[in-house]
Amino acid sequence: MKRLASVLLMVLFCVFMMMPTTAMAATKSDGNPDGGNLNYGEYGRPATLDPITSNDMISLRITELLFNGLVGIDEKQEIVPELAERWEISEEGKVYTFYLRQDVTWHAREGEDPVFFTADDVIFTYNIMMHPNTITPLKVRYEFIESVTKLDDYAVQFTLKRPILNALAKFSFKVLPKHGPQNSEFLTREDPFVQQPIGTGPYMLKNITADREVILVANENYFKGRPHIDKFIARPFADQNIMGQALMFNAIDMIVLVNHRDIPQIQGDKRFVLQPYNALSYSFFGFNLRNPLLADKRVRKAFTYAINRQEMLDSFFQGQGPIISGPFAPGSWAYNLDVQPLPYDPQKAIELLTEAGFSKGDDGIMEKDGEKLSLTLKVPIAKESEAVKRVVLAFKNYLNKVGVDIEAEFIEWLAWKEDIFLAHEFDIMFASWVFDDSADISSLFHSAEVGSWKNNFGAFSNPEVDSLIVESKLTLDHEKRRTINRKLHALIADENPYTFLWTLTNYAGYNKKLRKVAIHPYKFFSFSDEWFIPRSEQR
């Protein structure tokens, strides 16, 4: 393996020597200054730092700083060149040919010379992403690709199994270096690369501290021009209240997602900007259908009837958002407004539980065949935000009133992820999903996505849902796809694999010294190489 790596570096070094000297990136020509550090707060810690195995937003935000796709999405939500400088699409829409930039280098590891990005990296990324042993939520999104072919060092061709809607946007997947992962066939969370990645992006990983701060430094050779800010430091917080205080006392410069409780204080302080961004997201309680008690749809629906979601939203989040009814985020073109959220109706909840064979025991808890309806609810991070604590406590109290015993467990983020996504040791979990605009829910609800580290953690399986998901992907008619997704919405709402809660308006809070801040609605840092700090405010 070492010998092969040495040969590869020698070949690429020769290519480097033959490249024109103008290939290396220069300082941006926008007139804004370089320098300064940005310390930003995250609610939790990233599990992995690569774009393939990551399935949490903390990790994915960092990958926006480290990696690039063949194409990108600009502030107008239009597709723009990134690693590919141009492309051609065949008339029938089945062949996509990308012509790659020839001035892009990978972040150099210590003691190594820079290695140029080529078509080999694109093919390597696709193959490792689609390998059966690579556990990634991306696999199901790219099953429409039949093959990828290298035309030359800087041209690559994708042949699709069938034409699909908005295929070009899907080529925004992040590209990995062929010489990056230790295992060249598939990627696991045990590979050193997932904690020490190298990319082509505007920032490079410098180190991860003992306190799990992720320190990124500016890529001097970034092909779009050196990013202005010298250093990004992601600081993890286990308590949202402390994170808000850290911003107020200038210990950090930015909060990616402001606790709704802190909004008035930040909004009233002239030192800060409170910037809304409309992420396509929602919160939910998810059920583990491996538990026979929860395998019955009537039990799951009873839980949804039992809780007063509007009261919770008004009390804990100042009513900032709508109650939702199904699997698509409100604001998405796929959301079915005709499907109304189930009302708060504790009597209906009791009727459904009775219909499912439960009756109240002497202690007031529902039981069936001698087994009590007593379940665990797992929530990430031991010191949760006050609002989430209240949501969980309210959920527990509402269900207790209809005879369901809920034991809430607040556990550390990474341990929570292992319990939910790896071991599946839970009955109910609390979380949020954030989506892009593709409205692709296949990784969440298709039966093929049940398994370790996959997003269908609750083992939901419904043949009609599987069929509709596939049909939605196959159609080239946007209106037909909308109709299919409306059916999907109605069907999943009825199946109730989640108790769908609400979507909230997201806010970032940051110090006014940060300038030209534009936020990508669901990737956040996509435009961060343009951000800058005036020299007078750099420290």
Image (cartoon, grey):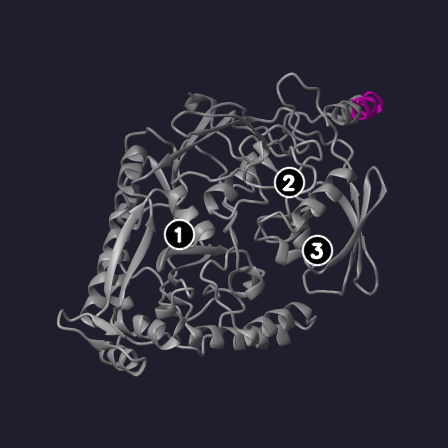
Identify the residue at horizontal 30%, vertical 58% (top origin): 376
Q: Quadrant of the N terminus?
A: top right
Identify the residue at horizontal 80%, vertical 24% (top origin): 7
Marks 3/2 in contact by CB < 8 Å: the verdict is no
Three-letter amino acid code of the residue under disc 3: Leu
Q: Main secondary structure of the magenta part?
A: helix
Whole-number angstrom distance, CA of label 3 to CA of label 2: 15 Å
Q: Quadrant of the C terminus?
A: top left
Whole-number angstrom distance, CA of label 1 to CA of label 2: 25 Å
The numbered dot on residue 68 is 2
- SS for callout 2: loop
| Residue 431 at x, y percent in the picture | 38, 55
Horizontal side, residue 507 vs residue 112: left or right = left
Q: How many marks?
A: 3
| Residue 105 at x, y percent in the picture | 71, 29
Identify the residue at horizontal 71%, vertical 46% (top origin): 127
* Residue 121 painted magenta: no
Horizontal side, residue 56 vs residue 478: left or right = left
| Residue 280 at x, y percent in the picture | 47, 58
Q: Which residues are magenta?
A: 10-20
Tell which tag, 1 or 2, sits nearer the viewer.
Answer: 2
Instruction: Give the residue number, with chain letter if any, for mark 1.
Output: 506
* Camera-side residue of 528 and 106: 106
